[in-house]
């Protein structure tokens, strides 16, 4: 059984670094899931979503990852 790894960032799901890290870890045999905001959210680490419903939206990247809407700490 492979180790499962959850990757997240504040630069967004389309950031090249998180996708490169996912690929590198996947190439080593790890089961990697990425959960990141839909756009860059740097300097928003204390923000929370209060007045909108939280939603998970499937984003079709080359490897079919998911993207979450909302703020980093939701």
Image (cartoon, rainbow, N blue to C red):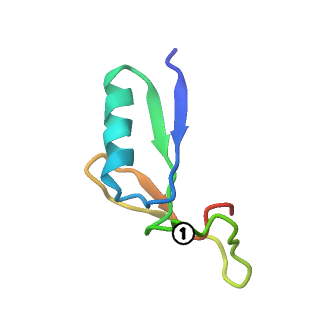
* Quadrant of the image containing the C terminus: bottom right
Depth check: give the residue in front, 57 or 26.
Answer: 26
Numbered disc 1: secondary structure: loop
Residue at the image point whose x is 46% and y is 29% from the top: 31
Residue at the image point whose x is 44% and y is 24% from the top: 30
Residue at the farthest bottom position:
51
Residue at the farthest right position:
50
For this view, does 57 lie left or right of residue 25? Answer: right
Residue at the farthest front position:
43
Task: Say which residue label 1 marks.
Answer: 69
Residue at the image point whose x is 31% and y is 41% from the top: 20
Depth check: give the residue in front, 63 or 22.
Answer: 22
Residue at the image point whose x is 32% and y is 30% from the top: 24
Residue 3, x across and y down, in percent: 53, 21
Residue 65, x across and y down, in percent: 39, 50
Residue 39, x across and y down, in percent: 43, 69
For this view, does 19 lie left or right of residue 58? Answer: left
Name which quarter of the figure residue 4 lies in: top right
Q: Does 4 sit above or below residue 8?
A: above
Name which quarter of the figure residue 21 lies in: top left
Q: Does 56 sit above or below residue 50?
A: above
């Amino acid at each position: 059984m492979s180790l499962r790894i959850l990757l997240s960032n504040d630069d967004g799901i389309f950031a090249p670094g998180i996708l490169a890290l996912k690929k590198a870890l996947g190439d080593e045999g790890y089961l990697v899931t990425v959960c990141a905001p839909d756009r860059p959210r740097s300097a928003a680490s204390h923000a929370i979503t209060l007045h909108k419903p939280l939603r998970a939206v499937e984003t079709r990247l080359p490897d079919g990852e998911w993207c979450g809407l909302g703020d980093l700490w939701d």
